[in-house]
Amino acid sequence: RYAFVNVQIGSPGFNLGNIKGARLQAAVLEAEMGAVVDIVMLVPTWDEEKWSLERRKQLLRYGVRIVTVPWTIPPTMTWRPESKGNWCGPMDFVRFHAFGLTDYDAVVYYDQDVQLQGDVGAVLKCAATERVFLATSALFAAINLGFFALRPDARLLEAVLLFANGSNFTHQTGWADSGWLPWDRPFVFGGECGQGYINSLLYQKHSKKGQEALRVAGLVGES
């Protein structure tokens, strides 16, 4: 069982082109593999409650499964930027709920401005067979959270919450003093949001806070 994952926070303004593309890809995968392929939209509980009946019907017509989530910022996180006006944190962090969709063998997340073309099924197949976090890099950032794929694991979501607890952020040292490797400069694009956060947790092996979160969650030592 697989899923294409979307996120919607604030006023609903779905990109139906993205959803239609995912639905076409889902149909191809279902025919090829005989598997169930869902389109999942993660929505904060307080936003979903405001949706009109027409909005709900619109998503149901495309077979979208609405999954409400309880937070957009990890509740264990105490750090906040001085100016929250343009902070991308909530939009990024809410995506981490995809890590906990353990009723799926693999999930893939795409930003709503991504238009799916061609066969993207290989991404889901790869993610289902290995414990990997598939993503791309970005300009001036090691990870671009506009796309990622993985086999969901509740321990990874637990590690996200553990890492948030007491972690500070600065432009010079990143999250929990984890640094910015492989970049040799202070701060990277999106560093104060999910891109820098997940890079610090998963890939900065010298990060004491990150390694401790992975160890407590039961993930350290696994490939």
Image (spheres, helix red, strand yellow):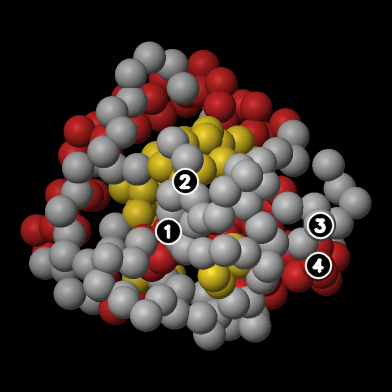
Residue that mark 3 sits on: 206
Say if 13 sits above or below 143 in the image: below
Q: CA distance from mark 4 to mark 3?
A: 6 Å
Residue that mark 1 sits on: 92
Residue that mark 2 sits on: 145
Q: CA distance from mark 1 to mark 3?
A: 24 Å
**Secondary structure type for disc 1:** helix
Q: From the viewer's side, name the closer residue of 60 and 107.
A: 107
Does residue 196 show up? yes
Q: CA distance from mark 2 to mark 3?
A: 22 Å
The C terminus - image quarter: top right
Q: Position of residue 100 (x, y in %)?
A: 59, 59
The image quarter in which residue 62 lies: top left
**Secondary structure type for disc 4:** helix
Say if 33 sits above or below 18 in the image: above
**Secondary structure type for disc 2:** strand
Q: Residue at x 63, y 77 (%)?
A: 167
The N terminus - image quarter: top right
Crowding at mark 1 (Cα within 10 Å: few <14, some 14-19, many 20+): some
Q: Position of residue 202 (x, y in %)?
A: 70, 52
Kindly indicate whether the residue at mark 3 contacts the one at mark 4 (C-beta within 8 angstroms): yes
Which numbered disc covers residue 208? 4
Q: Is 38 displayed left or right of 116 in the figure?
A: right
Q: Residue at x 16, y 65 (%)?
A: 11
Q: Position of residue 185 (x, y in %)?
A: 57, 48
Q: CA distance from mark 2 to mark 1?
A: 7 Å
Kindly indicate whether the residue at mark 1 contacts the one at mark 2 (C-beta within 8 angstroms): yes
Say if 8 sits above or below 159 in the image: above
Q: CA distance from mark 1 to mark 4?
A: 23 Å
Q: Is 223 displayed left or right of 19 in the figure?
A: right
